[in-house]
Every structure is written in structure tokens, then in C-alpha cells.
Image (cartoon, rainbow, N blue to C red):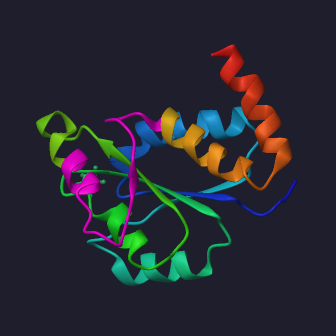
Amino acid sequence: MESRPLVAVIAGSESDMPVVERVLRVLRELSIPHDVAVISAHRSPKKLEEYIASSPAEVFIAVAGLAAHLPGFIASRTHRPVIGVPVSAKLNGLDALLSIVQMPRGVPVACVGIDNGENAAILAAEILALKYPEVAERLRGYRQLG
Ligand code: RP5
């Protein structure tokens, strides 16, 4: 198994950390090496751009609320898959859900349910399982338990 982070989990704000924790719990349970960063697409676009360009991750998980442009911003700068997690900061998360899911044709972002960090981690594992048989094996066990 690779030791470099295979999944980069990025949050738009420290206030998104409770949902990030849901992602991290599953990634840890599946022993998937990952990296966590808090970088706002709106407040620190340059820093985010540099982070994406230098990240060795094969999948990005972006956790954001309100006008949740973080996953779309990442997808505009990489061809690696991006999974967005809408956070229920306001409007019960509907604002973030629509911001993430309504990407223009040609620049896709996968979107899981509101606050459903667990599903983002499982989907990332399913993508990695195509290449890493050990992840596929752990995922089989994990889904049977669930
Ligand atoms: C979004 O705005 C973040 O992802 C967060 O969900 C929301 C609020 O951010 P803070 O004002 O708490 O930093 O960009």
C-alpha cells in the first residue's frame, strides 16, 4: 500500500470540521492514507491552487457550506476525481447542495448527501479500489459490516 496520501480532504472553513471528522473516521477505518487541509476557495484561492497542484492525492474530497464553490474550484484545476460534501451551514444545506451539484457540462463533481461525509469516504475508496486490490478487500469487509 502506498504511504503517500491517496485522498486529499479539503474543508472551506474550520467550521466544517464536524463533517470532515465523519470523512476521516471512515478513511481511518479503511486504512486509506490521506491528508487534511482547511483552505477557502474564496478567501485563499492562490493557496488552494498551489495545494492542488502539489498534492499527490488521487481523489479529492471537498467539504463546504453556503456558496460551496470549493469542489468546483478544485475540479477546474485538476482532472482527478472530486467529491463534494455539502454542509448544512444555512438553509439546511440546500444552498451548498445546489452549488456543488449544478456544475457546468464538462467539469463534473460527484456530490454526496448533505453532511454525509461517510459516503464521500466510501465513494473515494470505491474509486481507489479500481487500482488498489487491498482497498477493494477492506471495502468488502466494511460494507458487509454496515
Ligand atoms: C464556506 O462558508 C465554508 O465551507 C463554511 O461552510 C461556510 C462558513 O464559513 P466560515 O464563515 O465559518 O469560515 O465557505
Give the residues drawn in magenta, as a range: 96-117
User: Toward which corner of the image does residue 100 lie, by quadrant?
Assistant: bottom left
Q: Is residue 106 magenta?
A: yes
Find residue 52 and report its horizontal and vertical position in percent. Answer: 52, 75
Find residue 129 and report its horizontal and vertical position in percent. Answer: 73, 47
Find residue 119 and report its horizontal and vertical position in percent. Answer: 50, 35
User: Toward which corner of the image does residue 77 lie, by quadrant?
Assistant: bottom left
* In the displayed structure image, the side of residue 128 where residue 123 appears, left or right: left
Q: Nearer the viewer, residue 68 or 102?
A: 102
Find residue 79 and report its horizontal and vertical position in percent. Answer: 52, 74
* In the displayed structure image, the side of residue 138 where residue 60 appears, left or right: left
The mark total stands at: 0
Q: Residue at x 27, y 52 (%)?
A: 101
Residue 117 against residue 38 in the figure, above or below: above
Image quarter in which the C terminus is found: top right
Q: Residue at x 61, y 80 (%)?
A: 54
